[in-house]
Image (spheres, grey):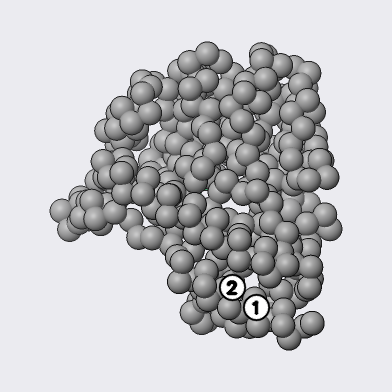
């Protein structure tokens, strides 16, 4: 740290992304990427003609992409915000809606680590609410109309989802506060609360291309909400970095909407592989949360969480381990291809046999 840093950031603890090692080839099951490549349409869209236009700025209004997304989700362009990954949207949302000193924000204690980082970055008062013993969210903790609410649905790293009815109760109980539902994993089997956007002007649904659309490397996220909420986010974007989505990502994003069917199929494959792998893990003595996402959250009755993580890493398989006391016996395992999961199961069987 330099002696020049703004004092308010001196003690800020930054988010720690999952490892992206380059030193050897791993079966990479640690950052919830898709094991499948982008669609042919996306690969064709990022072509020489588009690259040769890189001397020109991209469209800061992202009009063409918004129109495609609007048609796909049955909303208007004014209901859509697009940005450089959904992390960008979460960041802008904390900036836009949480910054008054009297606006508390509530989120689950065990959830996506970035919520706390953004709250601390902006000096927002927050309440990190414990989950129930079984890692489910008790929606009544979020009633009270006294705080903005941020919930990942399905939640991470548990994969457990709330129903649309439960989310609607949270919305009804907080009419004067923004309820942000982070649907990063919704395409893998949970119910989306998008149909509620028309009814509740305090709902912001945040989505990403990183997981279900195989585009983590392109950085593209979008949000759907009332025209007023979206205008607030646009104001923040145009006050920070109006060209925050590059040309190549814009055309790739449009092509991915055109090829939606391909991604729907991939999500089905991932969900099937998740169920298959969960069954195998249970046979090996694991407890798994009922995940509706593209990862499995699992704890062995034979080996500790950190030890399993380290032993898998030695054997060339990366999973995500969190040292937080309440979940330190678990690992979050991204669902890969069936072949990758068979390799995982074989290594786990051999590791747990050894440690018996
Ligand atoms: C991966 C993830 C994000 C961020 O996704 P990007 O669009 O890649 O920035 C947001 N929320 C949750 C819960 C995630 O797991």
Vertical order, 32 against 25 (above or below): above
Tell me the quadrant of the picture where the C terminus can be found: bottom right
Tell me residue 239's x, y (percent). 49, 32
Q: Rounded to the nearest whole Å, what is the CA distance between mark 2 and mark 1?
A: 6 Å
Determine whether the residue tagged by mark 1 lies in a helix, strand or loop.
helix
User: Which residue sits at x=51%, y=32%?
Assistant: 192
Asked whether the viewer can see residue 235, the reply is: no
Marks 2 & 1, CB-CB < 8 Å contact:
yes
Residue 201 lies in what quarter of the image?
A: top right
- For the residue pair 98 and 4, the one nearer the viewer reads as 98
At 78% from the left and 73% from the top, the residue drawn is 303
In the rendered image, which residue does mark 1 sit on? 349
In the displayed structure, 153 sits above or below 350; it is above
Give how far across and how far down residue 319 sits, in percent: 61, 67
Q: Residue at x 84, y 58 (%)?
A: 325
Q: Position of residue 146 (x, y in %)?
A: 77, 19
Q: Quadrant of residue 313?
A: bottom right
**How far from the left and from the top, in percent, is residue 46?**
24, 54
Relative horizontal placement of residue 62, taking residue 267 as reference (left or right)? left
- SS for tag 2? helix
Using the image as rendered, state which of residue 300 and residue 200 is in the foreground.
300
The answer to which of 110 and 276 lies nearer the viewer is: 276
Above-or-below relation of 122 to 249: above
The residue positioned 29% from the left and 32% from the top of the image is 68
> Does residue 242 appear in the picture of this structure?
yes
Name the quarter where the N terminus is drawn.
Answer: bottom right
- Which residue position is annotated with label 2? 345
């Amino acid at each position: 740290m330099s002696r020049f840093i703004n004092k308010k950031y001196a003690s800020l603890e930054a988010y720690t992304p999952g490892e992206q090692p380059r030193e050897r080839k791993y079966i990479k099951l640690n950052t919830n990427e898709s094991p499948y490549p982008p669609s042919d349409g996306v690969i064709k869209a990022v072509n020489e003609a588009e690259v040769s236009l890189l001397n020109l700025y991209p469209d800061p209004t992202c009009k063409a992409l918004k129109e495609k997304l609007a048609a796909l989700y049955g909303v208007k362009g004014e209901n859509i915000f697009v940005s450089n990954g959904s992390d960008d949207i979460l960041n802008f949302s904390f900036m836009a809606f949480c910054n008054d000193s009297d606006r508390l924000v509530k989120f689950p204690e065990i959830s996506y680590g970035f919520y706390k980082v953004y709250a601390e970055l902006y000096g927002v008062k927050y309440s990190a609410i414990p989950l129930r013993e079984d890692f489910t969210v008790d929606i009544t903790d979020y009633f009270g109309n006294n705080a903005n609410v941020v919930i990942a649905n399905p939640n991470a790293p548990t994969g457990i989802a709330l129903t649309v009815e439960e989310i609607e109760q949270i919305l009804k109980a907080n009419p004067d506060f923004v309820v942000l539902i982070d649907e990063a994993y919704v395409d893998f089997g949970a119910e989306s609360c998008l149909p509620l956007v028309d009814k509740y002007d305090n709902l912001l649904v945040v989505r990403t291309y990183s997981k279900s659309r195989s585009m983590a490397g392109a950085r593209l996220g979008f949000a759907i909400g009332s025209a007023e909420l979206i205008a607030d986010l646009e104001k923040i974007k145009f006050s920070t970095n109006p060209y925050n989505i590059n040309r190549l990502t814009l055309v790739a994003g449009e092509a991915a909407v055109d090829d939606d069917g391909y991604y729907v199929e991939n999500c089905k494959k991932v969900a099937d592989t998740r169920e298959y792998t969960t069954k195998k893990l249970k046979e090996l003595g694991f407890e798994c949360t009922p995940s509706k996402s593209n990862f499995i959250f699992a704890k062995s009755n034979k080996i500790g969480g950190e030890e399993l993580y380290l032993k898998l890493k030695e054997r060339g398989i990366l999973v995500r381990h969190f040292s937080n006391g309440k979940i330190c016996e678990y690992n979050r395992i991204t669902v890969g291809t069936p072949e990758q999961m068979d390799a995982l199961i074989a290594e786990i069987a051999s590791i747990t046999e050894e440690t018996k």
